[in-house]
Image (cartoon, rainbow, N blue to C red):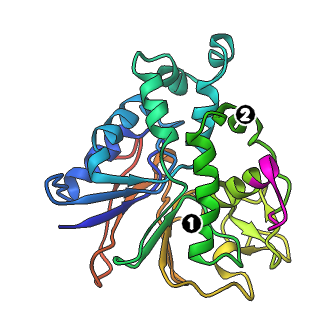
Amino acid sequence: MSVWAIGDLQGCYDATQRLLERIRFDPAQDRLWFCGDLVNRGGQSLETLRLIHALRDHSEVVLGNHDLSLLAISERSAEERRKVNPDLQRVVFAEDGPALAAWLRARKLVHADRELGWMMVHAGLAPQWTTHQAEGYAAEVEQQLRGKHYRKLLRNMYGDKPNWSTGLRGLDRWRAIINVLTRMRYCTPRGRISIDNKGAPGTQPAGLYPWYEVPGHIERDLKIVFGHWSTLGLMIGHGVHALDTGAVWGGRLTALQLDTDELRIVQVPGRNAA
């Protein structure tokens, strides 16, 4: 049995199929971890979502910001849904679109396997969050997404503020948790997120740090695999492993084997790449 973590798919169905063939994925014995952002921009979001749904008994998926956006769009009027890009329109107007959205809405924001020694999140963790705290905060949002008031959360999850604080309550708290887990790249030592800075490390203003190397950040008991940051690219170190290698931008789609001490990385060309 092999366990593979895979970076952001973003609707790149052909690249996903190439990668599964390259790692010789066998659903009878292997498992897949998808780091979020299954959809958007790749032109094949419907096919990609159907594929991952078909693999649901053999995979773990965490929600990314594009996945949450799709869920919000799915709850809008038909007129509003027609305003989004054609790639997402194909999902929300598909006959099985509601069923796919319901399945996606039940996915986690954080997945941890302590026996394996790994945690998966789409974007990152706040500097002072332990892995147990991250699971707990994620579970608060997951409960809302799976509950009867999920539409209210999806309508109100957008916004860059407030910054995370343990004293937050209700929608402000859930929005702050979502921003950390699905949108963060840089933050201050106190955990204030800079949403607008998206470049590679070294391009950010003074006082901002990649979330995984903030001075004084808590030491964590699990290795972390994440996506979201295509300009960072493949990065191995600091106890974290970044796997968004820009497949949707013509880069590569990356898989990392988690159940081996050997650093085994497999990549295939992304969208429109030779």
Find residue 150 and report its horizontal and vertical position in percent. 64, 36
Residue at x 41% of width, y 42% of height:
271
Q: Which residue is mark 1?
A: 135
* Relative to 173, 248 lies left or right: left
Judged by its main secondary structure, the magenta piece is: loop
- The quadrant of the image that shows the N terminus is bottom left
Q: Quadrant of residue 218?
A: bottom right
Q: Which residue is mark 2?
A: 152
* Relative to 206, 3 lies left or right: left
**Label ID, residue 94:** none
Find residue 22 and report its horizontal and vertical position in percent. 21, 56
* Relative to 65, 46 lies left or right: left
Give the residues in magenta: 164-173
Image position of 135 with respect to 12: above or below: below
**Circle 1 sits in a helix, a strand or a loop, which is it?**
helix
Residue at x 47% of width, y 23% of height:
98
Find residue 223 and report its horizontal and vertical position in percent. 47, 79
Give the Cα distance between marks 1 and 2. Answer: 22 Å
Residue at x 72% of width, y 33% of height:
152
Find residue 206 and report its horizontal and vertical position in percent. 85, 76
In this view, the residue farthest toward the top is 79
**Circle 2 sits in a helix, a strand or a loop, which is it?**
helix
Residue 43 visible within the image: no
Mark 1–mark 2 contact, CB under 8 Å? no
Residue at x 22% of width, y 67% of height:
2
Residue closer to the observer: 147 or 178: 147
Image position of 92 with respect to 35: above or below: above
Q: Is residue 104 magenta?
A: no
Query: Badge 1: how crowded within 10 Å, few (<14), some, or many (20+)?
Result: some
Residue closer to the observer: 157 or 6: 157
Residue closer to the observer: 18 or 107: 107
- Amino acid type, residue under disc 1 in the picture: Glu
